[in-house]
Amino acid sequence: MYYFQKLVYLVEFYVPYSFYVLYLLELVHYYH
């Protein structure tokens, strides 16, 4: 159960971060 809780925490942390990175990449692509 503890492992699952850790996994959920990691997903909640990394998913928004990955979307943010994708957004920045799109901006860079647009301006070049």
Image (spheres, grey):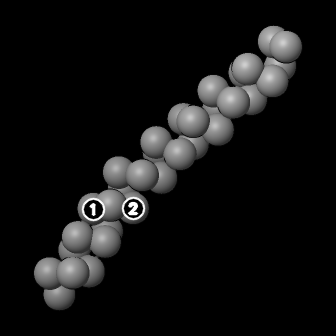
- Name the residue: 74% across, 29% down: 26
Left/right placement of residue 12 relative to residue 21 reads left
Q: Amino acid at mark 1?
A: Tyr
Nearer to the camera, 19 or 32: 32
Q: Residue furthest top?
A: 31
Dividing the picture into quarters, in which one does residue 8 lie? bottom left
Q: Position of residue 4 (x, y in %)?
A: 26, 80
SS class, disc 2: helix
Q: Label 2: which residue?
A: 11
Q: Vertical placement of 18 versus 20: above or below?
A: below
Q: Label 1: which residue?
A: 9
Q: Are marks 2 and 1 in contact (CB under 8 Å)?
A: yes
Left/right placement of residue 6 relative to residue 20 reads left
Q: Position of residue 25 (x, y in %)?
A: 69, 30
Q: Vertical placement of 5 versus 29: above or below?
A: below
SS class, disc 1: helix
Q: Residue furthest front?
A: 32
Q: Residue furthest bottom?
A: 1
